[in-house]
Amino acid sequence: MFKKFDDKEDVTGTTQLKSSIQKGIRKKLIENYPTLEPYLEEILPKKENFKLIKCKDHVELLADHTGVVRFVKTRNTDFIPTLRTLHKYPFILPHQQVDKGAIKFILNGSSIMCPGLTSPGAKMTPLVPKDTVVAVMAEGKENALAIGQMTMSSEEIQSINKGNGIENVHYLNDGLWHLAEKPLN
Amino acid sequence: MSEAGDIASLAPGPIEGVEYPLKVLYCGQCTMPLEYCDYSGQTELCRAWATQNVPDLLEGLNIDDSKGGDEKKHQTRGGKGSKPVKEKKKASGGVQKVTVQREPRGKKSVTVIKGLATFEIDLKVAAKFFAQKFACGSSVTGNDEIVIQGDVKDDLFDLIPGKWAQVTEEHIDDLGDKKR
């Protein structure tokens, strides 16, 4: 999804949001990620205005007052945290762990196939319904390496065990990852 | 895996006794968390970076390297490995150039400056400085773009090198007028 994403080419404009709309977004984030509530103040302080960056293909980025991109909205997902946000608050999303063999493919941007989620090195959070946004962890690693959207429920992955299980939305070293890198420092 | 305790936290929700935000160390070479350096396709450079910057963590990294050896054997059979990163990043970062341009806004005009960020100039500070200097409005309008209200293009050729020594007059390009 963000394999090729360039801040010069893909960004169409930034908007300073009205505070009422900001309030709405904050409320929505808490609704989607209830565990985030005590920490939202740290990510998007109420006193500061955050910006909405509109991009091509219905992608919208949410940048905090310092210009660091914290959340992303795509055509078929709601606001999801970026990997950098997720690394700081790994509990936001349900985790799905893949085995070691899958890592390099995911880092190339491929979707996560079911066998990578069901093999001995992998672990799945049960009862995750279809279309949920999940953090993709890896065997033996502490940090998430990708964020994906389930194309089947965990149970279906377990029973079908073939084909795409999680669609790769955002992974380490993709365009979005590099975008967040610059204003951070 | 010893991380079992960590992964037992598959269910969402903050872990008790852990302080958030977590600090994750990223490799200065491949920008990924250190544990993923194996897959960067430039392990050598990553290790060099780690030796220099975080020697105390290198021990953990070395263990990963031995695993990386196995991984490499697999790759020789072909298939998609992690590709070595191409060096196009340096090329784009290497072009340091500032462009100034007059752009009509009705019967008045504004001046658009691009490229200041390639000299690692803080755009917000720069915009404020221009606003003060020319007694006019000035704002950061995009990634690496400043708009100054009023036609001040000619003054900029002296002002910018005077304020930021790293920018010389040769770096500044005059793009003339932008056609509507």
Image (tube, coloured by chain):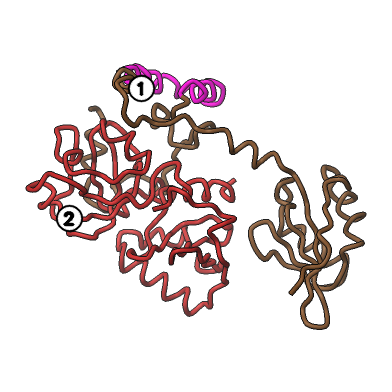
Q: Is residue A112 left or right of residue A48?
A: left
Q: Is residue B101 left or right of residue B85?
A: right
Chain at numbered mark 1: B
Dot in front, 1 or 2: 2
Helix, strand or loop at label 2? It is: loop
Chain A tint in image? red
Whole-percent x and y of residue A50? 53, 66
Q: Which chain is brown?
A: B
Question: Mark 2 Cα within 10 Å, few/some/many (few <14, many 20+)?
Answer: many
**Which residue is the site of mark 2?**
A152
Q: Residue furthest left?
A: A159
Question: Mark 1 Cα within 10 Å, few/some/many (few <14, many 20+)?
Answer: some
Pointers 1 and 2 within a single chain: no
Seen in the picture, residue B3 relative to B175 is either above or below; the reply is above
Q: Is residue B92 left or right of residue A7?
A: right
Whole-percent x and y of residue B24? 44, 39
Quarter of the image holding residue B159? Answer: bottom right
Amino acid carrying label 1: it is Asp
Whole-percent x and y of residue A121? 19, 32
What residue sits 26% from the left and 31% below the top?
A: A100
Chain at numbered mark 2: A
**Which residue is the site of mark 1?**
B64
**B57 is within the stretch colored magenta:** yes
What residue sits 53% from the left and 21% below the top?
A: B48
Q: The magenta stretch spans which residues?
A: B43-69
Q: CA distance from mark 1 to mark 2?
A: 32 Å
Provide the major secondary structure of the magenta segment: helix
Whole-percent x and y of residue A156? 11, 52
